[in-house]
Amino acid sequence: MDEWTQSLLKELTEAPGVPGYEGDIRRIVREKMQGMAEIECDNLGSIICAARGAADAPRIMIPGHMDEVGFMVKLVTKEGFLRFWPLGGWWSQVILGQRVQVFGTKGPVTGIVGSKPPHILPAEERKKPIELKDMFIDIGASSEEQVKKMGVRVGDPVVPVCPFEKLSSGLLLAKAWDDRVGVALFMDVIRALSGGAHPNTVYGVGTVQEEVGTRGAKTAAHAVDPDVCLVAEVGIAGDTPGVKPEDAKGDLGKGPQINVLDGGMIPHLALRNLVYEVAEAEKIPYQVTGLTGGTTDGRPIHLHARGVPTIYIGVPARYIHTHAGIISADDYDNAVKLLVEVVKRLDAPAVAKLKDAG
């Protein structure tokens, strides 16, 4: 992984961007892609980066969603604590005691998700997980009026806190890998293609509101009207204690994951086989997996218009939908290589063949 990419991943993951509040991520994409792509936004806020090659078509869409899981201020208690709604899928046990930032009118305000100390919990209560509705955020305020003076109000976004760090093993730790990985992937693909020819036009798209229903992907698909879609995402790593091979297949360091199934899409068979062939021809390591407990931007995109051949390629990540996760830089680099090589093969005859075989 070169310095440009590592710096990009740090900037993307440390920036705030929960569903509906992706502006900081959009700004980063716009700044970095200047001179490499033609940039526009749709009316929902997804950013579209068009890298034109030897032909206007086929139109190859590579979406990566800009939003991360987070929260929204629901109400302020008279004592100055914040109740909150989840934005995206959370498991309550990973939330308590974690640092967050509330982005109000006067800038970020640091807080912590509060809980009772174990010393005062009855034995039976210790065994029960606390529900989200019973949690609160402590920003150090003592009254509702003080919260107002701090610039915090109902509707403000709440973002997990975790700085980017390169671990001694070479793995990368940060928040929001889901899906700043995908955003960085399409940016790196466009960067790689800018130095040479490709037989199509590539649309790298930072979509909005994926975590609350793949909303931005639907509007972005109308804007792009793609011929093929390569979804750039994280995958579920299966190399931690307690995870069985039948739950998730994906070890860090063994390559990107080609997904044969998710909760909203079965990939286009001919496109899937082409990805296999490219990976093997270029000696790019890959892993084959699937999941039924979630979906990606591929769900609305593959159903666009008359249908779009679509596949989901993921970078294995540990601990997604928590405050911090871990990926392998090698897996990321190999995902970029795989996407670039697939794009180079998607000329008009190849895409026509895909559709005929579909």
Image (cartoon, rainbow, N blue to C red):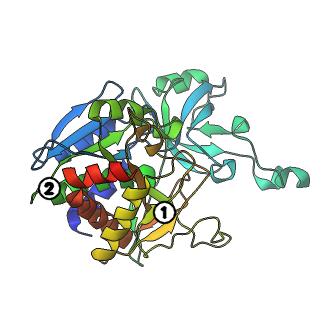
Identify residue type, mark 1. Answer: Ala
Residue closer to the observer: 135 or 185: 185
Residue assigned mark 1: 317
The image quarter containing residue 170 is bottom left
Give the number of the mark in front: 1 or 2.
2
Residue assigned mark 2: 198
Where 184 sits versus 150, above or below? below
Where 149 sits versus 313, above or below? above
In which quadrant will I find the N terminus? bottom left
Q: Residue at x 35, y 45 (%)?
A: 63
> In the displayed structure, does residue 186 sit left or right of residue 242?
left
Q: Position of residue 233 (x, y in %)?
A: 42, 54
- State the CA–CA distance, disc 1 to disc 2: 30 Å
Identify residue type, mark 2. Answer: His
Q: Are marks 1 and 2 in contact (CB under 8 Å)?
A: no
| Count of all numbered marks drawn on residues in the image | 2
Where 1 sits versus 291, above or below? below
Q: Earlier in the sequence, mark 1 or mark 2?
A: 2
Res. 64 in view: yes
Secondary structure beneath label 2: loop
Q: Residue at x 24, y 64 (%)?
A: 341
